[in-house]
Image (cartoon, helix red, strand yellow):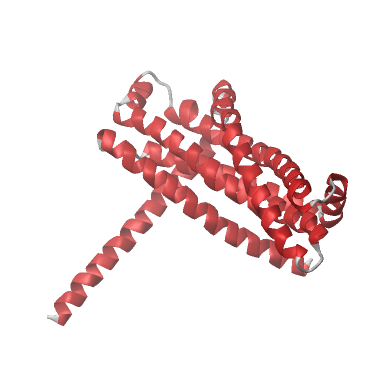
Amino acid sequence: MSKIVFIMNSEKIFYKLSLMFKNLGDFTLYVLKILKFIFKGKVYFSNVAEQFIALGVKSLFIATFTAIFVSMVLVLQTGLQLEKFGAKLSVAGISAIALFREMIPVIVALIVGAKIASSITAEIGTMKVSEQLDAMEMMAVNPFSYLIIPKVLAVSLSFPLLVLYCDVAGIVAGAVIANLSLNINLSSFFTVASNFLDYMDFLIGLFKSIIFGIIIGIIGTYYGYKTSGGAKGVGIYTTYSVITTLIIVIILDFFIGNWIVFLEKIL
C-alpha cells in the first residue's frame, strides 16, 4: 500500500515538474518571439506612444500616491526611533538611500506594476477569447507587432520615468513630514540627504526600475496572449498575471540587490 501511495505521489510530482518546465519553455519562446519582432523593426510606433499614455501617464496618480505615503511613513517612523539616540537629523540620509535604492522602485513596481499587468492581461485576454486576435491575423495584421510589442515597449520606457518622478515626489514628501513632525528644517533635510546620497544610489534604483518595467510588460502580455476559457478564463489569467508580477518583482529585487552588494565589494 505504501509503495502504491509513493508511486502516485511521484507521478504527481513528476507531472507538476513537467508542467512547470513546459510553462517555462513557453515563456522563453514567447520572449524570444518578442525580441525577434523588435530586432526586425516590426513595431507600430504610433501604438507605442498611445500605450505610453494609457499605461504610463495614466498611472501617475497611483504612483504619486504610493510614493508620497511610503516616504512619509518611512521618514516618520525612522526619525522617531533615531530621535531617541540624538541622531534625528540622520533620518534624511538614511531614508533617502532607502527610498532611492529600494523602497520607491520596489513598492511602485508592486502597486503600479500589478495595476498595469492586470489591465494588459484583461485587455488582450478579452480580445483572445472573443477571437479578435484571430481576426487581426486574417486581415494580415500581426498581433505581436500591432498589440503586444507596443505594450511591452511602452511599459519598459514609461516605468523608469515613473520611478524617477516618484523619487522626487517621495523625497519632497519625506522632507515635508520631517519638518512638520520632527521639526527638521527643510534645507537641513536636503543638505544631509545630498551628503549621504551617492550617484550609485540613483543608478541602482534606475536599473531596478528598467528591469521591473520589462518584466511587467512581458508578464502582462504573456498571460493575456495565453488566455483561454471565455470570460472566466480572463479573470483567472488576470489573477495569474498579478500574482506572477508580485512574486517575480520580489524575487528579482532580492537577486539584483545581492548582485549589487557583491559588485560593490569587489570594485
**In front of the other: 109 or 150:** 109
Horizontal arrangement in the rendering, residue 33 relative to residue 79 (left or right): left
Q: Give the percent coordinates (x, y) of residue 38.
A: 56, 34
Q: Residue at x 45, y 34 (%)?
A: 119
**In front of the other: 29 or 229:** 229
Locate residue 231: give its quadrant.
Answer: top left
Q: Give the percent coordinates (x, y) of residue 218.
A: 49, 42
Residue lying furthest bottom in this view?
2
Q: Is residue 4 above or below residue 152?
A: below
Q: How many marks?
A: 0
**In front of the other: 260 or 36:** 260
Report whether residue 231 is seen.
Answer: yes
Horizontal arrangement in the rendering, residue 116 relative to residue 7 (left or right): right
Horizontal arrangement in the rendering, residue 95 relative to residue 192 (left or right): left
Q: Quadrant of the N terminus?
A: bottom left
Q: Residue at x 53, y 47 (%)?
A: 110
Q: Quadrant of the C terminus?
A: bottom right
Residue lying furthest top in this view?
139
Q: Is residue 223 above or below residue 45?
A: below
Q: Is residue 17 above or below residue 1?
A: above
Q: Is residue 249 above or below residue 53?
A: below
Q: Residue at x 60, y 29 (%)?
A: 57
Report whether residue 39 is seen.
Answer: no
Q: Give the percent coordinates (x, y) of residue 62.
A: 57, 36
Q: Give the percent coordinates (x, y) of residue 233.
A: 29, 39
Q: Residue at x 71, y 39 (%)?
A: 169
